[in-house]
Image (cartoon, grey):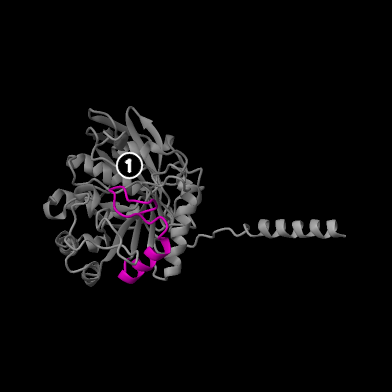
Amino acid sequence: MKKIALLLALCLTNMSFSQGNTHKQQAGKFEGLAMTPPMGWNSWNTFATNIDEKLVKETADIMVSSGLAAAGYNYIVLDDGWMTHERDANGDLVPDPEKFPNGMKSLIDYVHSKGLKFGLYNCAGTKTCAGYPGTRGYEYQDARFYAKLGIDFLKYDWCNTEGITAKEAYATMSNALKTAGRPIVFSLCEWGDNQPWEWGKPVGNLWRISGDIYPCFDCEFKHPENWSSWGFMKIADMRKDIRKYSGPDHWNDFDMMEVGNEMNDTEDKTHFAMWCMLSSPLFTGNDYRKMSKETLAILTNKELLSVNQDKLGIQGFKYIILDGVEVWVKPLSDGAWAVSFVNRTETAKKVAFDWSKNNFKDIDFGYEADFSKTTFKIKDLWKNKETGNTTKVFSASIASHDVITLKLIP
């Protein structure tokens, strides 16, 4: 009897141990906060950690006065470097008092008073990429801190994350934000190393698909620390077969834009067109105080923005390459299509595109354009004028690294 009782006790003990590990963490982002790709400004590309209160206020003022806010750019996101190097006695993050002498809450209130939204940055690891306090082990505390400040957007990076898994780390922070109670757009900046498009939809509203961008058309910039930044066309080409994972409230994020930073206006124009075709979030990364009228015109092109913000929310794809000219297509609502011709070469190219021989098929979402059955009017979105229809061959010359973007209207 004693043996039977002992065996029964051991079985019950083992059952209790096994049952104790059956709970699965359920991520729970705030739904419906990013039904079109979010638009705004991020400090990193131009300023890195050299950020302060004056910069943010001037950026907010210009965003409103220049027409950027009216065009849809409504988030101001402070990237790495906004805090001190140590948490306070209660374990809370501390906004740098030298950079933000009136406090972060006062600054956020100022941005909100302009009709804009405010975002901050942190990291899933023990430290941020620039060496400031990371969130590991403080997820729920930091989420309450952000909710109390009144932020609207959190960019969450992936440095110094040894020993943890991306899926669980981002789910934990997603839950923490939800528990804190303030609707905050959650941006997963995991660089695509752990395929966030496969698990990110219930966790965040957008996720990075690559390492950092660099202000060049098609280059790789190798850093001394043995990592690379990428030209915008490199990023556009980087991931295959991920467009099916992107859509309203769960976007593939191709990184902040470099429009207005070091490239020429032609390349800036192509960069912007590609991000619109790809349904990428549109975060400017330039210094608004030094912005040229050409840069502003590119960023506020209403026709291109309507392609990016189209309610269908489908990411475009590369359809064909013709003598170094790539043809990218994107289905739009109401049966329309956007088409971009991108000259990847170093010389000007002539294009003669016969619509009747090039029916579009979107195998991921089931859309099709059969030009033998339907005639489409053609609108040049950079020139903002109609230019014939699809019964005739489309002919044009495209300069090196330039783009032509058309809208086909049935």
Which image quadrant for residue 67? bottom left
Q: Is residue 102 above or below residue 191?
A: below
Q: Which residues are magenta?
A: 123-151
Q: Quadrant of residue 325?
A: top left
Residue at the disc numbered 1: 340
The amino acid on which the numbered mark 1 sits, given as a three-letter code, is Ser
Q: Nearer the viewer, residue 382 or 87?
A: 87
* Picture coordinates of residue 29, whole percent (x, y): 46, 62
The x and y percentages for residue 295 are 17, 49
- Could you tell me which residue is drawn at 58 percent across and 58 percent down? 24
| Tally of numbered tags | 1
Q: Residues within 10 Å of mark 1 (few under 14, many from 20)?
A: many
In this rendering, would 261 be left or right of 392? left
Question: What residue is shown at x 46% (from left), y 46% (from top)?
Answer: 163
Seen in the picture, residue 103 relative to 313 is either above or below; the reply is below
Q: Residue at x 47, y 58 (%)?
A: 172
**Membership of 5 in magenta stretch:** no
In this picture, is 41 found above or below 114? Answer: above
Give the image location of residue 77, x and y in percent. Answer: 27, 58
Front residue of this view, candidates 82 and 86: 86
Residue 184 appears at what percent x and percent y?
Answer: 38, 65
Residue 391 appears in the rendering = no
